[in-house]
């Protein structure tokens, strides 16, 4: 267990700097760009699995819809190990950005 010998005022100041950093426009914009890329990647995949109808709509295979609806309804703790790992992979896209921002507060 880490013991922080800083006094309460120092800890409060550190928490405040961390909060300001995590809510900074720069960090929010950087994370939003990563989120957009994550979303766009998912949409490219989703669209690649569907069949384009004459009216431009997209028809998805029933087995994929069933799988995704099951995943939507399943808490993370109850997902398969493979499904959990897929979610973790997405988190790892964000961590280096957050770590770099927090390093700037030290």
Image: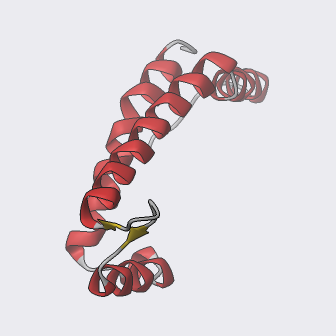
Quadrant for residue 52, please give it.
bottom left
Q: Is residue 44 left or right of residue 58?
A: left
Q: Position of residue 87 (x, y in %)?
A: 34, 59
Residue 75, above or below 48: below
Residue reaching furthest to the left: 82
Q: Position of residue 77 (x, y in %)?
A: 40, 78
Residue 85, above or below 72: above
Foreground residue among 33 and 8: 33
Q: Residue at x 55, y 32 (%)?
A: 32
Q: Count the marks: how many?
A: 0
Residue 99, above or below 48: above
Q: Is residue 106 left or right of residue 93?
A: right
Quadrant for residue 11, please give it.
top right
Q: Residue at x 22, y 74 (%)?
A: 81
Quadrant for residue 94, please give it.
top left
Q: Quadrant of the C terminus?
A: top right
Q: Position of residue 76 (x, y in %)?
A: 42, 74
Q: Position of residue 75 (x, y in %)?
A: 47, 80
Residue reaching furthest to the front: 54
Foreground residue among 65 and 23: 65
Foreground residue among 74 and 2: 74
Residue 6, above or below 36: above
Q: Residue at x 44, y 59 (%)?
A: 56
Foreground residue among 66 and 59: 59
Scheme of colours in the image = secondary structure
Q: Residue at x 79, y 23 (%)?
A: 9
């Amino acid at each position: 267990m880490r013991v922080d010998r800083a006094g309460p005022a120092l800890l409060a100041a550190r928490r405040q700097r961390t909060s300001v950093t995590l809510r900074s426009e720069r960090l929010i914009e950087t994370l939003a760009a990563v989120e957009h890329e994550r979303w766009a990647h998912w949409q490219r995949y989703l669209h690649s699995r569907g069949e384009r109808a004459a009216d431009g709509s997209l028809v998805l295979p029933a087995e994929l819809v069933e799988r995704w609806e099951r995943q939507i309804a399943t808490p993370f703790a109850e997902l398969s190990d493979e499904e959990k790992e897929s979610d973790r992979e997405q988190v790892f896209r964000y961590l280096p950005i957050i770590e770099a921002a927090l390093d700037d507060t030290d």
